[in-house]
């Protein structure tokens, strides 16, 4: 069904509630549908320019969101719901302008919406309704495993509310990966130490290409509309590799469980040239758009463990990403929702280098990792944290610019997950809310966890020469610049000792090389 046939179908002039559905709320088990009356209520969805241009969004990300939204609108119509759908063809600037048009045509008693994944959107809609004295009801998001208010209650009496303890709390409540005595399976809560293997020289073995997802007429039409109405989006592409329906999302889930989950735990931190997917699931987009329920994903994985098909370290590592980290960063996002944009604990003030948008750099690890983002809108968590994120941290990029790039370029990016991960975990702009330390490393880490350094013009073990790896040079510059902050840290203090023990001449050479990098970053 074309979007023109979806738009405004069946919505009578007078209705009870206008029920807003945003692009990351495509679930049929939403609280929005609990008391939805097909005779009195109307679904509202909109593709607007502001969410792709003013709030930058790449071609791949925008294509995914619009395609999934249009498929969801069709599903709503099949369920007998009336739908008001504004496509990008209508060229609405914002959600507010699209809503304003409809309120001139239709009469509603009030508006209902599930809590959006972006505080900015929440504020915009709230102000719009307040200005028009239009009743607005924000409903709880039931997609997540933690209960409404549960994270706030848990975090309030914690001096250092780290993810590990929140994860254990949820494990106990749900019973997932727990034995009959209330103890973690295998006697340990966390198998992270067993999940850091790198590949041998021959690279990944028994690696099967992920399932291909055909593009239907709806998805192809979105691509045409973007070319006509949103030209110039970053990372232009002709191929969309992400699920846009619940059926496709479940196919990706089963493909992962059958072919990659077994090796996921061992190699979840590893990287390899020309292999963007490795043993990862490709499920983050489906989860964040709510095409898949996290409970279904976790229980499907645990089922194969119960059948003896997958080792505990793989299952636990996978479950921890969803039950632990995903739930944790969402809780922190809403706790600090109006503070994130001001955070810059390290006082970073440099511009994001142009090669983040083009991939044109001689650093092989950055070229590979950014190239994946430009082509697929994707990189796994180590590529994000310890390659692209690490470089911007060491280089000292303004956190707001880093966050804007991540939100624009990654297809699974929604503010509630991207902001804490980027400003907190990756850039340490929050000063330690998300993690206890800056995640810093030299080029040696990338060399250990990948084959990126093989054939690179830079050498990961050198810091002061012309052939020195920029990561290694900037690593030591970071330790030098933030010496007082790191000096007493239980996990990073030794690095300040190592820096202090370097000869004065070597320290001076590293500082000189770092200054050259700051002045000539586009040549790197």
Image (spheres, grey):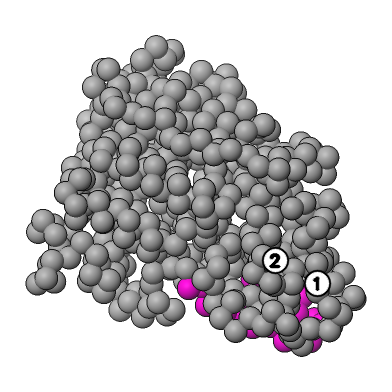
Q: Which residues are magenta?
A: 122-142
221 lies left or right of 294: right
Q: Secondary structure at mark 1?
A: loop
188 lies left or right of 281: left
Res. 24 visible in picture: yes
Asked if 299 appears above or below 480 in the picture, the reply is below
Which residue appears at 44% of the width and 45% of the height? 252
Q: Position of residue 279 (x, y in %)?
A: 34, 36
Q: Position of residue 194 (x, y in %)?
A: 18, 42
Q: Is residue 11 magenta?
A: no
Q: Is 183 or 520 nearer to us in this picture?
A: 183
Label 2–label 1 contact, CB within 8 A: yes
Q: Position of residue 70 (x, y in %)?
A: 69, 55
The residue carrying mark 2 is 77
CA–CA distance between discs 2 and 1?
9 Å
Res. 93 visible in picture: no
Which one is earlier in the sequence, the residue at label 2 or at label 1? 1
Label disc, if present, on residue 281 of the rendered structure: none
Q: Quadrant of residue 6?
A: bottom right
Q: Position of residue 521 (x, y in %)?
A: 56, 25
Which residue appears at 24% of the width and 65% of the height? 176
Q: Is 70 or 153 nearer to us in this picture?
A: 70
Q: Is 164 or 42 nearer to us in this picture?
A: 42
The residue carrying mark 1 is 10
Q: Is residue 126 magenta?
A: yes
Q: Quadrant of residue 202?
A: top left
Which residue appears at 26% of the width and 74% of the height? 173
Asked if 135 appears above or below 505 in the picture, the reply is below
Q: Quadrant of residue 374?
A: top right
Q: Is 168 or 119 nearer to us in this picture?
A: 168
């Amino acid at each position: 069904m074309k979007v023109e046939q979806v738009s405004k179908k069946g919505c009578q002039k007078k209705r009870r509630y206008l029920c807003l559905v945003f692009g990351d709320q495509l679930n049929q088990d939403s609280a929005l549908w609990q008391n939805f009356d097909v005779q009195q209520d109307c679904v509202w969805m909109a593709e607007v320019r502001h969410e792709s241009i003013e709030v930058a969004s790449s071609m791949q990300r925008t294509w995914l969101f619009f395609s999934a939204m249009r498929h969801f609108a069709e599903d709503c119509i099949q369920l007998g719901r009336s739908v008001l759908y504004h496509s990008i063809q209508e060229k609405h600037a914002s959600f507010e302008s699209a809503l304003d048009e409809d309120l001139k045509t239709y009469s509603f008693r009030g508006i209902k919406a599930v809590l959006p994944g972006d505080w900015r959107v929440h504020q915009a809609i709230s102000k719009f309704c307040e200005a028009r004295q239009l009743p607005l009801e924000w409903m709880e998001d039931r997609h997540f495993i933690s209960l409404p208010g549960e994270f706030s209650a848990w975090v309030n009496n914690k001096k250092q509310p780290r993810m590990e303890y929140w994860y254990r709390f949820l494990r106990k409540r749900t019973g997932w990966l727990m034995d009959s005595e209330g103890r973690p399976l295998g006697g340990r809560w966390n198998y992270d130490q067993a999940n850091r293997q790198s590949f041998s020289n021959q690279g990944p073995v028994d690696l099967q290409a992920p399932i291909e997802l055909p593009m239907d007429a709806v998805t192809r039409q979105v691509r045409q509309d973007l070319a006509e109405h949103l030209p110039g989006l970053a990372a232009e592409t002709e191929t969309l590799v992400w699920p846009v329906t619940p059926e496709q999302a479940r196919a990706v889930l089963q493909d992962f469980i059958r072919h990659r989950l077994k090796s996921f735990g061992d190699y979840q931190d590893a990287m390899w040239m020309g292999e963007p997917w490795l043993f990862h699931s490709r499920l983050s987009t489906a989860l964040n758009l709510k095409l898949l329920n996290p409970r279904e994903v976790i229980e499907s994985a645990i089922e194969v463990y119960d059948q003896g098909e997958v080792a505990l370290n793989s299952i636990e590592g996978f479950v921890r990403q969803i039950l632990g980290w995903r739930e944790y960063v969402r809780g922190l996002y809403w706790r600090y929702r109006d503070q994130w944009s001001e955070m810059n604990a390290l006082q970073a003030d440099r511009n994001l280098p142009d090669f983040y948008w083009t991939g044109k750099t001689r650093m092989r690890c950055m070229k590979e990792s950014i190239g994946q983002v430009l082509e697929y809108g994707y990189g796994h968590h180590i590529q994000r944290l310890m390659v692209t994120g690490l470089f911007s941290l060491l280089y000292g990029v303004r956190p707001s610019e880093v966050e804007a790039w991540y939100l624009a370029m990654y297809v699974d990016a929604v503010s509630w997950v991207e902001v804490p991960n980027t400003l907190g975990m990756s850039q340490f702009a929050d000063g330690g809310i998300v993690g206890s330390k800056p995640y810093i490393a030299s080029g040696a880490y990338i060399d250990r966890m990948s084959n990126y350094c093989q054939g690179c013009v830079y050498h990961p073990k050198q810091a002061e020469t012309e052939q020195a790896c920029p990561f290694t040079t900037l690593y030591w510059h970071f330790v030098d610049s933030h010496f007082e902050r790191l000096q007493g840290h239980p996990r990073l203090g030794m690095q300040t000792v190592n820096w202090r023990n370097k000869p004065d001449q070597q320290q001076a050479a590293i500082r000189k090389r770092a200054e050259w990098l700051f002045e000539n970053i586009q040549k790197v």
